[in-house]
Amino acid sequence: MRLLSLVTVFLLLLSSQLPAVEIGLDSNVDKQLGAQRLDNSLRSIEWFTLEYLRKAEQAEMAADSEQADFFLQKADESDEKASKIRWRAIKAWYLAGRDKKAHEISLRAAHIAKVRAELVELRLHKNELDLERLLSHGKQKEKSRSVLDIYPSYEVAYKHYVASAYQLFLEWTEVASMYDEAESYEEAELYWQKSIDVMSFLFRLNDDNAHDEEIPYQTYIYDTQRALMRLENLQLSLEKNEQLELTRHALQSLEKLNKTFFPEVVEH
């Protein structure tokens, strides 16, 4: 009888543990299913973002800046929607114990940012050619009035040039921060360096024009709110990944860059 009682107690104890194990398994499955749903939604939005960027590139190559800007705006709106889901999906995969899946999302985001950065580089090159053309035209005029005659056109072209360079800095930084998030640190360092190179170029550009009496330096930004949002995201990314030397350097230089070029953004 005592042996039977012990066996009964053992079976009862064993059976009491089974539901807990099943619940644990069910809970993890639910987490993975939830993460996958978010990931699927994110992929759909990312497809539209890349499609808009592809059309923007086609327009840029065809020298149709108005159409390129239209599709860039569409890409920005699509990417803004994606960003609201992206971090939720990354967190969901981490909670489900699927770190690799979370990293895949960050790598996809890095790819989108790279495509956008390459498009901005095209625009920057076009703006540079516009400046060279205007300066060449000015030199053919009367020397004492060469720059003043073309000043309104030059000022607009110069502002667009600075804005494109600044946007390129933000795009390369976003690429680097997403590689950091994916723990792809070699790639992250490569793109942090690209970001810092553009930052250094912007500082040199400011120094070159700081004492120019004919063409006073003026700051410019296409969309202050969009820039501010990017800067806030960038600040968080840099602070989170400050173990990298290049990242620390970028973080230290960011405030100086903003105050130099876009004080109206910093003040808001």
Image (tube, grey):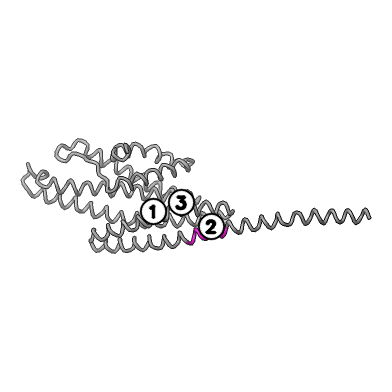
120 to the left or right of 98: left
The residue singled out by tag 2 in the image is 35
The label number, if any, that marks residue 80 in the structure image: 1
What SS does tag 1 mark?
helix
Principal secondary structure, stretch drawn in magenta: helix
- The disc, 2 or 1, on the residue closer to the chain's N-terminal end is 2
Magenta stretch, residue numbers: 32-40
Disc 2 and disc 1: Cα gap in Å? Answer: 19 Å
In the figure, residue 255 lies in which quadrant? top left
206 to the left or right of 40: left
Q: Position of residue 82 (x, y in %)?
A: 42, 56
Disc 3 and disc 1: Cα gap in Å? Answer: 19 Å
Residue type at mark 2 is: Ala
Q: Position of residue 266 (x, y in %)?
A: 33, 38
The label number, if any, that marks residue 179 in the structure image: 3
The residue lying at 41 percent from left, 60 percent from top is 46
